[in-house]
Amino acid sequence: MQKPIPFNFGRNKNILKPVDITFENTNLDLDLSPVSYSKIDVERNLIFPEKLTPDLAEEIGMHLGDGFLSAKRNEYRLKGSYIDEREFYKDFIKPLYKRLFNLDVSLKDYAQCYGFEVCSRALWTFKANVLKIPAGRKTGIRVPEIVKVKDQEILSAFLRGYFDTDGCLSFVSKYGYPSYYPTISASSISEFLTKDVAEILSMLGLRPYVWFDGNWWSVQMFGYANFFRFFDLIGWNSKKYIDKINAWRLRYPKLANGASGEMVSQGLVEPLFRVRSSARALQSPGGTLSPLEIAFPRPPSCKPFLSGKGRMIGF
């Protein structure tokens, strides 16, 4: 039987900073003149957004996560896990590409993944020449300058697309409680991309750390303060992460559904975040979460830890 969590469990003063976006660019307009259409592109009636929208920012995040733009042909690929991402591709990614580009992607199984490949001169030139995403290996890739705008909705959408595809959310056993402590991370071969992502997370008030193990770079966030801020400002669209959160909510309903007013008045918890009802709202047994102020317990200490070889850099 799981032991109850005491009211004063995990008390500390680890309060995250407010949102402070230091990017100065506010221009969201896109110059589509470099887009070159093939005859097939014209027959497909492909379209491209004239402004940087949250949908497009999210797609850019997906590209930097699991996408690949070929340097040898007009080909773009986006592929994820064939085990637990099928619904995400069918229910979210496929409609997203239809909305953005009027492109009907054909999803299929590959050797060890699931997703799509598309040959299109127009899509390739849009990504390479308008969005300025380099083709080929992603060793030196970084967040495109076009995404670095003073717009919280755009930055949040970009991060959501990136973490949905290349990220990881887990609840690890800690303090004697199973599947309790939240960690959020994303790994890349690119040092520049990882540090760019960490910079944007910091602007949104999160507390990320950058870790290098000798081969891969990763950005990591620990504890409830980071988890609730990420959930509130960024969120997830991938069903595999929503399922993980729902399992945690059922295991620890007091943490997920808020604390009593008495706990707030005693200073044991404090109202920090607002859960918003949206297309990404998590489903509870009683239905969709509605907008409400939720008082979440102060998170356990999330000091950086080192294990094995590597180094961690705080942001």
Image (cartoon, rainbow, N blue to C red):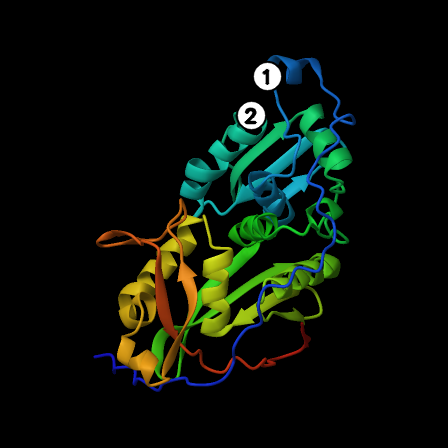
- The quarter of the rendered structure image containing the N terminus is bottom left
Where residue 34 appears, as percent x and y from the top left, is 78, 27
For disc 1, the marked residue is 44
Q: Is residue 136 above or below residue 176?
A: above
- Residue 76 shown left or right of residue 226 in the figure: right
Q: Earlier in the sequence, mark 2 or mark 1?
A: 1
Q: CA distance from mark 2 to mark 1?
A: 7 Å
Amino acid carrying mark 1 in the image = Arg
Residue 192 image point, x, y percent: 74, 59
Q: Quadrant of residue 309?
A: bottom right
Q: Residue at x 62, y 37 (%)?
A: 77
Name the quadrant containing residue 204.
bottom right
Is 102 on the left or on the right of 310, as rendered?
A: left
| Visible residue check, residue 108 | no
Residue 60 at x, y = what percent?
Answer: 63, 43
Number of residues whose C-alpha sits closer than 10 Å to that of mark 1, classed few (under 14), some (14–19) or many (20 or more): some
Mark 1, secondary structure of its residue: helix
Residue 158 vs residue 291, the one in the foreground: 291
**Residue 62: image x %, image y %?**
58, 45
Density class for disc 2 (Cα within 10 Å; few <14, some 14-19, many ≥20) is some
Residue in front for this viewpoint, 218 or 246: 246
Residue at 42% over, 55% down:
241
Query: Do the residues bearing badges 2 and 1 touch, measured as CB atoms within 8 Å?
Result: yes
The residue at 50%/57% (across/down) is 233
Residues 275 and 194: in front is 275
Please state which amino acid type lies under the numbered disc 2: Leu
Instruction: Give the number of marks.
Output: 2
Residue 103's mark?
A: 2
In the structure shown, which secondary structural element does the residue marked by tag 2 occupy? Answer: loop
